Image (tube, rainbow, N blue to C red):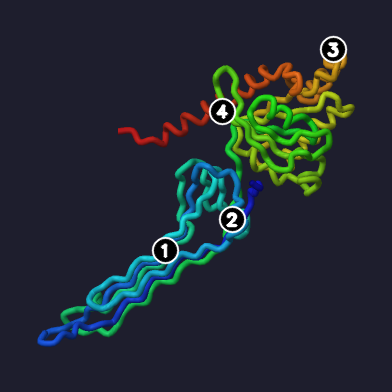
């Protein structure tokens, strides 16, 4: 299945049915009177986050979603049938943006989240509604309300606990393959990963989700390489795992390149907790490891862990560090959720 995280859709809710002008006329019935029914309401367009989807590929082949119109009212006080709603099923983590691609209308971050994108028009009143003691034969009705037509963007941000960052060939896909059942493409050339991958990682009987995104290069915020199109997939993460290639002769510059792109991207991404790891240490001897770690710690201004995704050296310690940051993030958000709950 092709990965698609951005789609444009055109939606339109149904118009309400017109009210009916009708009078009761039956043989041998002395008194008639108005009996025009109301029109039915138009169908609405609703979006819902569902399980089992991890891409917006369905919206590549269908971009137009038009709800049914309401049926007009009829005589004998018969109300028109309501138009059927249209339900857009989207993956969990989908943001719905206005046509300007900036205004966020809704963020469907949990299974079952629903939002009404376009409400159907109300049905018009029939002439029965206008009957009064002084106007017993009204010859007027209301037209149905028009539907709402709008253009929206759907943007998917994957739900993950930890996100992988690094230059191309920093070992992100190797780490994901070594710690989970995910099977991302691994090769010795840059930009092997062309779309995000998710993997479920376990350590000490606790599981969490890790997201691997394509590598960043200098100038990604300006569109170089694959750009920063996929950084949105790690915005929801509790912690970022920054992998630095220990065999690179410019590892400090590599680290600063990624940090610069995070700051250029903006938002809260640059302020998220980060675990910096010197990767590929299986290709270094003890002296080279110590020198590389010392240089990187000076640039980071804090501790740096060492790991090898191939030999799995240090992998467990890195996973435990990620788990600690994830638990701390959940504790930070837990009080705010409890405050929202109503207390008797």
Residue 145 located left or right of residue 232: left
In the image, which is nearer the foreground, mark 2 or mark 1?
Answer: 2
Query: Rounded to the nearest whole Å, what is the CA distance between mark 4 and mark 1?
Result: 41 Å
In terms of sequence position, does the residue under pointer 2 or pointer 1 come before the other? 1
Disc 3 and disc 4 in contact, CB within 8 angstroms: no
Q: Earlier in the sequence, mark 3 or mark 2?
A: 2
Residue 22, image x, y percentages: 26, 82
* On screen, residue 315 above or below 54: above
Relative placement, left or right, of 173 versus 209 is: right
Q: Residue at x 18, y 85 (%)?
A: 25
**Rendering coords of residue 236 (x, y %):** 60, 37
Residue that carries the numbered disc 3 in the rendered image: 286
The mark that comes first in sequence, 4 or 1, is 1
In the image, residue 89 sits, relative to residue 130, either above or below, namely above
Residue 247 percent location from the top left of the image: 85, 25
The residue under label 2 is 59
| Residue 188 appears in the picture as rendered | yes
Residue 301 in view: no
Which mark is on residue 337? Answer: none
Where 62 falls versus 269 (above or below)?
below
Residue identified by numbered label 4: 329
Tell me how far mark 4 sits from mark 2, CA to CA. Answer: 34 Å
- The residue lying at 82 percent from left, 40 percent from top is 218
Considering only order in the chain, which callout, 1 or 3, is on the residue closer to the N terminus? 1
User: Which residue is identified by label 1?
Assistant: 43
The answer to which of 76 and 330 lies nearer the viewer is 76
Q: Total number of numbered labels?
A: 4
Q: Position of residue 172 (x, y in %)?
A: 73, 31
Disc 3, disc 2: CB below 8 Å?
Answer: no
At 45% from the left edge and 44% from the top edge, which residue is drawn?
112
Identify the image quadrant of residue 241: top right
């Amino acid at each position: 299945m092709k990965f698609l995280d951005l789609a444009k859709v055109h939606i339109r809710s149904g118009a309400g049915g017109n009210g009916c002008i009708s009078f009761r006329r039956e043989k041998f019935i002395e008194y008639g009177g108005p009996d025009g029914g109301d029109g039915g309401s138009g169908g609405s367009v609703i979006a819902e986050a569902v399980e089992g989807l991890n891409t917006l590929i369905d919206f590549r082949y269908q971009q137009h979603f038009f709800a049914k119109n309401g049926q007009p009212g009829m005589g004998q006080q018969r109300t028109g049938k309501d138009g059927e709603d249209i339900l857009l099923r989207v993956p969990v983590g989908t943001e719905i943006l206005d046509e300007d691609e900036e205004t966020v209308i809704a963020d469907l971050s949990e299974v079952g989240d629903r939002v009404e994108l376009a409400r159907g028009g109300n049905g018009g009143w029939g002439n029965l509604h206008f009957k009064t003691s002084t106007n017993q034969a009204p010859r007027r009705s209301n037209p149905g309300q028009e539907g709402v037509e709008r253009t929206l963007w759907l943007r998917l941000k994957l739900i993950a606990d930890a996100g992988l960052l690094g230059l191309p060939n920093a070992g992100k896909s190797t780490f994901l393959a070594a710690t989970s059942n995910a099977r991302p493409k691994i090769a010795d050339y840059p930009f092997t990963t062309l779309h995000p991958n998710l993997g479920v990682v376990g350590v000490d009987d606790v599981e969490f989700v890790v997201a691997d995104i394509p590598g960043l290069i200098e100038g990604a915020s300006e569109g170089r390489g694959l750009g920063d199109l996929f950084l949105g997939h790690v915005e929801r993460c509790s912690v970022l795992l920054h992998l630095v290639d220990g065999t690179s002769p410019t590892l400090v510059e590599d680290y600063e390149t990624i940090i610069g792109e995070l700051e250029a991207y903006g938002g809260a991404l640059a302020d998220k907790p980060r675990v910096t790891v010197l990767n590929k240490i299986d290709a270094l001897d003890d002296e080279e490891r110590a020198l590389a770690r010392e240089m990187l710690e000076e640039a980071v201004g804090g501790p740096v862990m060492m790991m090898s995704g191939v030999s799995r050296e240090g992998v467990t310690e890195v996973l435990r560090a990620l788990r600690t940051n994830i638990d701390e993030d959940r504790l930070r958000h837990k009080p705010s959720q409890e405050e929202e709950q109503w207390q008797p």
